[in-house]
Amino acid sequence: DAGVTQSPTHLIKTRGQQVTLRCSPKSGHDTVSWYQQALGQGPQFIFQYYEEEERQRGNFPDRFSGHQFPNYSSELNVNALLLGDSALYLCASSRGTASSGNTIYFGEGSWLTVV
Amino acid sequence: GESVGLHLPTLSVQEGDNSIINCAYSNSASDYFIWYKQESGKGPQFIIDIRSNMDKRQGQRVTVLLNKTVKHLSLQIAATQPGDSAVYFCAENERTGANSKLTFGKGITLSVRP
C-alpha cells in the first residue's frame, strides 16, 4: 500500500515563474491538504481539498492555488514566484477530516528553490 | 530522562535513557493531537496521536500525555536509540465548523549520544 506520494522531489525555479507540484494521497484517502515548511520551521497550512473543492485556506496569497481531481490526487500551483517561496512543500492526506477520527499522513515533500 | 519545552531548540540524551518532549498548544477547542518525527530531508512521519477525550495513549516505546487543563502535551520515548535522532513536532487539529487543519509547534531537535 503506497503512502502519500509527491512529485517532483526537487526543483529550481526562477523568480517570477510558475510551478506545479503534484500529490497522490494514500490509498483510501479522500482529503488532501498542502503545507509549506520553511527551513527550521514547522509546516504551515496552505489549504485543504475535499470532493474537488477547497474547503479551508490558511494565510497564503492568491498566488497559491490548487486543484483536486476525481481520483483524489491534487496539485498545488504557485504563480509569480518569490525568493521567499523557497521551501519544502508537503502534502498530507486523510480519510475525511481528522475530527472524524482518521490519522493524517504526510508525503516526503517537494523541495522548491527559487533563484 | 530529560524534558524541555518547545521554546528550547535541542534536547540531548544518552542512548538508553528516556526522553520527554513537551509542547504547549494554543487552542482549547482542538480535539486531536499528533506527534510527528522528521528526519533531515524527509517529510513528517506519524508517531502517535491522541484525541481530546483521552489523557494518555501508549505505543511501542512511546507514550503521549495530554493535559487539557493547562493545554500541555508531552511525548515520552523509552530507551532512546540513535535512530530516534530527529526533529519532533507536535500538532493540534483546530476545527472551524466542519473543517479542520493542523497547526504545528516549532519543533525540537532530539540528539542521542552514543
Image: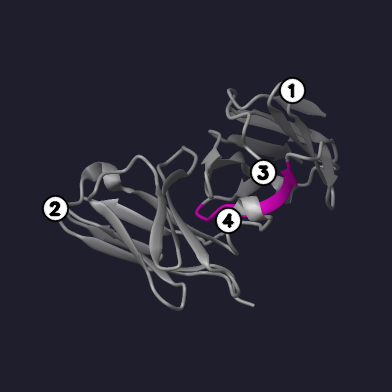
Distance between the Cα atoms at labels 4 and 3? 11 Å
Q: Is residue B28 magenta?
A: no
| Dots 4 and 1 on the same chain | no
Q: Of marks 3 and 1, which one's residue comes earlier in the chain?
A: 3
| Dots 3 and 1 on the same chain | yes
| Dots 3 and 2 on the same chain | no
Distance between the Cα atoms at labels 4 and 1? 25 Å
The disc at residue A16 is: 2
Identify the amino acid type marked 1.
Thr
Identify the amino acid type marked 4.
Thr
- Residue beneath disc 3: B32
Q: Dot 2, crowdedness within 10 Å: few (<14), some or many (≥20)?
A: some
Q: Chain of mark 4?
A: A
| Magenta span of residues | B41-51
Instruction: Answer with left or right where residue B104 lies relative to residue A38.
Output: right
Please name the predominant secondary structure of the magenta segment in the image.
strand
Instruction: Answer with left or right where residue B12 lies relative to residue A114.
Output: right
Residue A104 at what x, y percent from top left?
Answer: 60, 56
